[in-house]
Structures are given as structure tokens and as C-alpha cells.
Image (cartoon, rainbow, N blue to C red):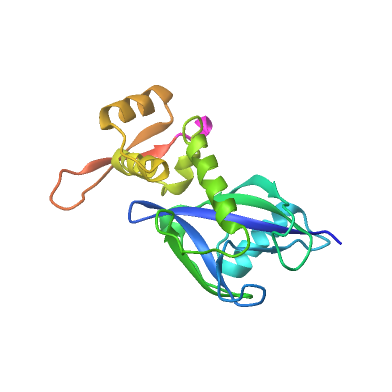
Amino acid sequence: MTEVTVDVVIFTIVDHALSVLLVRRGIDPQRGAWAIPGGFVLDHESLDDAALRELREETGVVDVYLEQLYTFGALGRDPRGRIITVAYYALIATDRAQIAAGTDAVAAQWWPVASLPDELAFDHAHILDYAIQRLRAKIGYTNVGFQLLPAAFTLTELQSVYEAILGRNVDKRNFRKRIEQQNVVEPLEEWRRAGASRPARLYRFRSAAF
């Protein structure tokens, strides 16, 4: 019998690096392996509701941006039988990224995508790679990266998010020109000081542009 699961790749920014939330499995199969949070869809649930429930139960994360990614159903992907997973990716700002392992996960941890565990459970390395490529593609034509920022941010912080997702530096002048042309942020009458540098103006996302 074919069964359906959901897996959720959830990203944030930790120390200027794009990071993904992984849980250490507390049950068989592959007990002790690091994995993407997920689990079986219950009879009364929609796929979206199942994804949100699994995130809440395994990591304590709630109220996130969530988007369906892809359906993975290769033969032999799960030793328990014919199991198809509907994968999602989620984004959460760093200031909201507190986690706590629960239910069938014995640990939950943020991992930089550039420095992941040697092996992940099931086909989760493939799912994670697909999610990273999707996010990098979408950052070029949508404002999805704003989901990784707090409500008020500096332009330097905004650029840092783009660089973390893309995995490379971007030209400061060209970046700010592009943001200005898109008209997606608005300045606040607030400033933030970092160290001995001059205070930097804070901005917020213009919600009508999202």
C-alpha cells in the first residue's frame, strides 16, 4: 500500500550563512540519523496542515512562510515500503528561529548548508539540494528573501540575506540600485548602530509589493 508523508526544508540565516533545520531521528528506520522534519499525513489532514503540524511537533516552529516544493516518489527511497513524500520549504527570520526537539526527534539543530552532516536519512540530501536550488532561483525574481528578515532591517542586512542565499558576494552599488528601482522597501525614522560605525537607517518591507 502506498502511503504519503510530508517533509519540510526550513531555512533561516545564522551568522550570515544560509542554514537549514535538521532533526536527529529518535525512531527506526535510520535511528540517530539527521533528517529533514516530516512525517505521515493523517487521514483527516490536508497536506499543508500536515506539514505545519510536523514542524510544530518536531521542532516547535510555528507561523512560517510555507510553499510546496516537489513530490518525491522514487522506488526504494524508504525501507518501510512504497512511500511518496510531498516536500515543502519554509522560511523564518533569525529573530524567530528558536527551536525545540519533540515527539520522534531527539535533537533539532540549525546547520549551514555549506557544512552539512556527511549523510542524511532516506533521500533527504536530494530533497535539500532541490530546495536550495529553488530558493536561489526564486530570489532572482521574487521578494521571498524578505521572509528571512526581522520587521525592521538595514540595507546591509538585506544584502547579507541575498548573499547568504546565493552563496556569493553581490556588488553593493548595483544591489541598492536594484532595490530602489523595485520600490519594495520604505525607510523608517529609526537608525541602528553597529559597533563604532555610523548608525544605519532602518527599513521595512512594503507589504503591498509582496
Q: Nearer the viewer, residue 76 or 206?
A: 76
The answer to whether 52 appears left or right of 41 in the picture is left
Residue 76 occupies quadrant: bottom right
Residue 64 seen from this side: no
- Is residue 209 on the magenta stretch? yes
Against 31, residue 21 (above or below) is above
Q: Outermost residue, left direction?
A: 196
The residue sitting at 77% across, 54% down in the picture is: 46
Could you tell me residue 209's position as x and y percent? 51, 30
Q: Main secondary structure of the magenta part?
A: helix
The residue sitting at 72% across, 52% down in the picture is: 74
Q: Nearer the viewer, residue 179 or 16?
A: 16
Could you tell me residue 6's position as x and y percent? 69, 57
Q: Nearer the viewer, residue 191 or 176?
A: 176
The answer to whether 177 appears left or right of 29 in the picture is left
Q: Which residues are magenta?
A: 206-210
The residue sitting at 69% across, 64% down in the picture is: 39
Identify the image quadrant of the N terminus: bottom right
The answer to whether 210 appears left or right of 14 in the picture is right
Q: Outermost residue, front direction?
A: 76
Against 89, residue 204 (above or below) is above
Could you tell me residue 41's position as x and y percent? 76, 61
